[in-house]
Image (tube, rainbow, N blue to C red):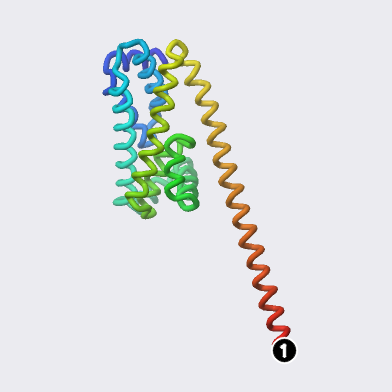
Amino acid sequence: MSETVFALVADWGPWVILASAFLSCFALPIPTSLMMLTGGAFVSAGDLDLWQVVGAAFTGAVLGDQAGYGLGRFGGAALAARLERRPARAAALARARALVDRRGGLGVFLSTWAVAPLGPWVNFIAGATGLGWARFALADILGEVIWVALYVGLGMIFASQVSVVAEVMGDVMGLVAAAVVALGAGLWIGTAMKAQRRARADRAGRAEGAARGT
């Protein structure tokens, strides 16, 4: 895989990075992170220009995210129903819907880098559920800045060990994603418990008021 990516970046430069960043937004199995690491390594060696690599990765990612949002906005429930016919896609869409419902723009922001595998599904769900475009775009742009800067920067710093860094980052981002999910679940449980306590207090207050009235 690494040799193929190196050859593609060497032959096509920023263009292949742009294309991979765009296509990965449609849940295609494309090693975009490795592409960006490789692009950073070529920048470090002086073979590619930093701003061309960063610009290509950022532009491809944002355009792809916007396209996914557009599909959700205009395809809506009908397209979602078709996607949910496969159990794996249905599960991914369910997780994406939960993230957007609970966190809104913050969920979009996290999906661009902290839980990147969920990103394509979050883009679609954000459009399908009517999350405002301006809110989506701002969260998306901020998140993609972090994602691109992180991987291109690591590629520049560890130019001679790109494959190792890619493997390590895969493990690290997996842990980050798990932590984000655990944190979200903890916050949701805490909110639910507070709501339950308030409901009990309200019922107790009403019961006490009724008892005094009699």
Q: Quadrant of residue 199?
A: bottom right
Q: Position of residue 66 (x, y in %)?
A: 31, 42
Q: In this image, 75 relative to 191: left or right?
A: left
Quadrant of the snapshot with the C terminus? bottom right
Q: In this image, 151 relative to 178: left or right?
A: left
Q: Check disc 1 and report its element: helix, strand or loop.
A: loop
Q: Residue at x 39, y 15 (%)?
A: 41
Q: Residue at x 53, y 36 (%)?
A: 177
Q: Residue at x 73, y 83 (%)?
A: 211
Given the current orientation, which residue lies at the most extreme bottom position? 214
Residue 121, relative to residue 57: is it above or below? below
Residue 199, relative to residue 190: is it above or below? below
165 or 44, which is in the foreground?
Answer: 44
Residue 85, relative to residue 173: is it above or below? below
Q: In this image, 180 relative to 85: left or right?
A: right
Residue 1 appears in the figure: no
77 or 179, which is in the foreground?
Answer: 179
Q: Residue at x 31, y 50 (%)?
A: 75
Q: Position of residue 43 (x, y in %)?
A: 34, 15
Graded by Cα atoms within 10 Å as few (under 14), some (14 to 19) or many (20 or more), the crowding at tag 1 reads few
Residue 188 appears in the figure: yes
Q: Amino acid at mark 1?
A: Thr
Q: In this image, 141 relative to 174: left or right?
A: left
Q: Position of residue 23 (x, y in %)?
A: 33, 32
117 or 140, which is in the foreground?
Answer: 140
Quadrant of the snapshot with the N terminus? top left
Residue at label 1? 214
